Amino acid sequence: MKLEKVTKESAGRSRRYHDACGAAHGLDLVGERWALLVIRELMMGPRRFSDLRKDLCGLSANVLTQRLEGLEASGVVQRRKLPPPASVQVYELTDWGYEIKPVFMVLGRWAARSPQHDPTLPISAVSIMQSFETMFDAGRAQGAAMRLGFVLGEDRMVVDVADGVIATRRGEVEGCDVVVRATPPAVVAAAVYGKVPLAALESEAGMIIEGDREIFARFIDFFHLPEKAG
């Protein structure tokens, strides 16, 4: 048992960069495969283990457990138990963990210019909301004031746009100017980033738009993928 512990500790140290650069240490903390995507899925609040597993396609339970344990040991993630009647364990980012959000936004904008980026791949509800904040064109939204609700499977999200500022959050969609229902979430990406006509998505992909559809149409114009590099 002692030898096994030493071997694991040695393996952990060997994966580090041993470099004083802050970026290198950042990769020591979150550079393991899937770690950043686990963090992404926690950006909009606490999640259960099963929720994380569902939204991270291709991630095994064993690897998810390892990543959560590593991020918890690094002080990026913490566990807590929700009070009754839920009484379930959830994972959430620490205050320091949330500070990585601007890194995601810069990385997302940069990577969207890659000629190899494929926006048609599966995408989670949280990732859609994060992309809205990342790709938002404030100039196109000047003077706009709207509240949109998105029901993406079991997830309910609210997006507020006012005076060129966008904010996303989890929340109930009642009272929104327009509510968009879609499963899978990639259907919304097809509308917003692929500019697929809404009528086609309603008839062929099961999208449902409730309320003022013109508001959603204007919202779509706030987002345009950047030109590819090279």
Image (tube, helix red, strand yellow):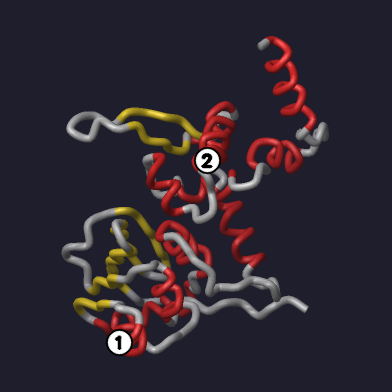
The amino acid marked with disc number 1 is Ser
Q: Where is 180 relative to 71, above or below?
A: below
Residue nearer the viewer, 131 or 3: 3
Instruction: Residue 79: give x, y in percent of width and height.
Output: 42, 29
In-front residue for pair 211/58: 58
The residue to which callout 1 is attached is 203
Among numbered discs 2 and 1, the one appearing first in the sequence: 2
Q: Position of residue 146 (x, y in %)?
A: 29, 71
Residue 6 drawn at (x, y percent): 73, 16
Vertical relation: 102 (above or below) 113: above
Q: Are marks 2 and 1 in contact (CB under 8 Å)?
A: no
Q: Amino acid at mark 2?
A: Leu
Dot 1 crowding, Cα within 10 Å, few <14, some 14–19, many 20+: few
Q: Which structural element holds mark 2?
A: helix
Label of residue 140 in the image? none
User: Quadrant where the N terminus lies?
Assistant: top right
Q: CA distance from mark 2 to mark 1?
A: 37 Å
The residue that appears at 66% across and 65% down in the rendered structure is: 110
At x 50% / y 74%, what residue is drawn? 137
User: Residue 119 appears in which quarter of the rendering?
Assistant: bottom right
User: Exactly how many numbered labels are in the figure?
Assistant: 2
- Residue 31 placed where, x, y %? 68, 43
